[in-house]
Amino acid sequence: MTHLTDTEKQQIISLFHAGVSHRGIARQMQRNPSTISRFLRTQKDLSQSDDEDIITNTIQIRIQQYTNIFNLLLKKDIGMSHINNYTALFSSYLQTDIKPDKQYSMLYTMLHYLNPQTEDIIADIGCWTGYFTHALAKYSKKILAIDNTFKQIEWAKKIGKHLWVPNVDYILSDMRQYNYPPAWLDSICAPFVINYSKSTKELKLLFKNFYDSLKKWGKLVGLIDAPHDIVHNNKEYWSIKTIPSGKMNDGALLELQLFNGNNLLCTLYSCFYRKQTIEKTLLDLWYSSVERKKPLISPEGINEYPSEYWLNYVNNCDIAYFVAVK
Ligand SMILES: C[S@@+](CC[C@H](N)C(=O)[O-])C[C@H]1O[C@@H](n2cnc3c(N)ncnc32)[C@H](O)[C@@H]1O
């Protein structure tokens, strides 16, 4: 660490807070990425900021990420003409917003498959602090942002206010119990929340509620945890997913460890479902089509990381996207 000057250290911390990846910082500072990562790991207080710091940093990161995505949309590069205890986990999960795949693939991919239109009414289920909600709100008429954790809904509101997206209704509710207006929604965005169904029965009920709430031809775009094995080590992409029972059965407990480099950010638990089970459940409920989709990488992500990094990501992906049309 001795070879970083105090000024350089300050610059690194500022860039980190602005959401620049370790690699991006290294490039800008003309330093080795491992030097940057090692230094950031020593800065324990980076993960202990108070609420004000958290909101400022989050907004800076989101504005940066949204600006990049929106610039692309304007250029129509992605065909957008017509995108536990979560209170306790709040700060640590927030840090996963800068996970490389979340930054450069998940937002881009979800927006691509949702393809929001100016007249669309969309529900974002398990909306968290509005990561997908606020991006979608820019392109649609109304968003129902649903989450069952009070803190997330409050923060989603705060962040939405700063990002100037007034067309969002924030709803504190369990996704399984919310009274979805019938045949009203154009799309449902469900990233990393379907796996909170505790059984195939609950999964079916959830998909049935979604079905009833969608207009004819409305679509459900889901993003689920889909490890290939009982231990899917994807640490290069900041995650290790484990099924402690050792059996890849539907409803089995799934442990998710999310990292930044070697730092464990948080451990989450949800339920594993086989992709075939998800698809069959949807088709049994009369969805007219169900398609698995590949993750897409934003042009910015392609600039930020070498092509082998993304090729390996896509080939060894521990998540799965699907689009189900009513
Ligand atoms: C893993 S986070 C995903 C957040 C966000 N969709 C994203 O991808 O960044 C799961 C979110 O779903 C919420 N959640 C979990 N179970 C839920 C339920 N039964 N009903 C509504 N929200 C739920 C949690 O509070 C949390 O904000």
Image (cartoon, rainbow, N blue to C red):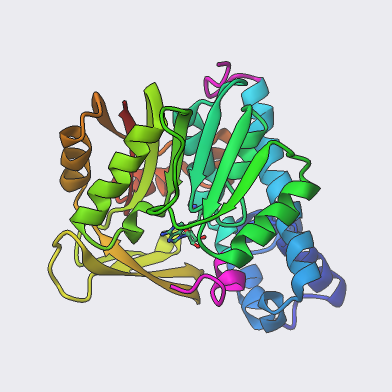
Q: Position of 309 compared to 162: left or right? A: left
Residue 291 seen: yes
Q: Nearer the viewer, residue 131 or 15?
A: 131
Residue 84 on image: x %, y %: 43, 72
Residue 300 seen: no
Check if residue 78 falls in the magenta segment. Answer: yes
Check if residue 191 falls in the magenta segment. Answer: no
> Residue at point 56% right, 21% down?
80
Q: To which quarter of the image does residue 38 belong?
A: bottom right
User: Where 77 falls versus 4 (above or below)?
Assistant: above
Residue 249 on image: x %, y %: 13, 62
Quadrant (top left, top right, bottom left, bottom right) of the N terminus: bottom right
Q: To which quarter of the image does residue 311 belong?
A: top left
Q: Which residues are magenta?
A: 75-93
> Residue at point 46% right, 40% down?
189
Q: Nearer the viewer, residue 88 or 259?
A: 88
Residue 141 on image: x %, y %: 63, 27
Q: Position of 81 compared to 323: left or right? A: right
Quadrant (top left, top right, bottom left, bottom right) of the C terminus: top left
**What secondary structure prevails in the magenta region?**
loop
Q: Nearer the viewer, residue 164 or 16?
A: 164
Residue 170 on image: x %, y %: 62, 49
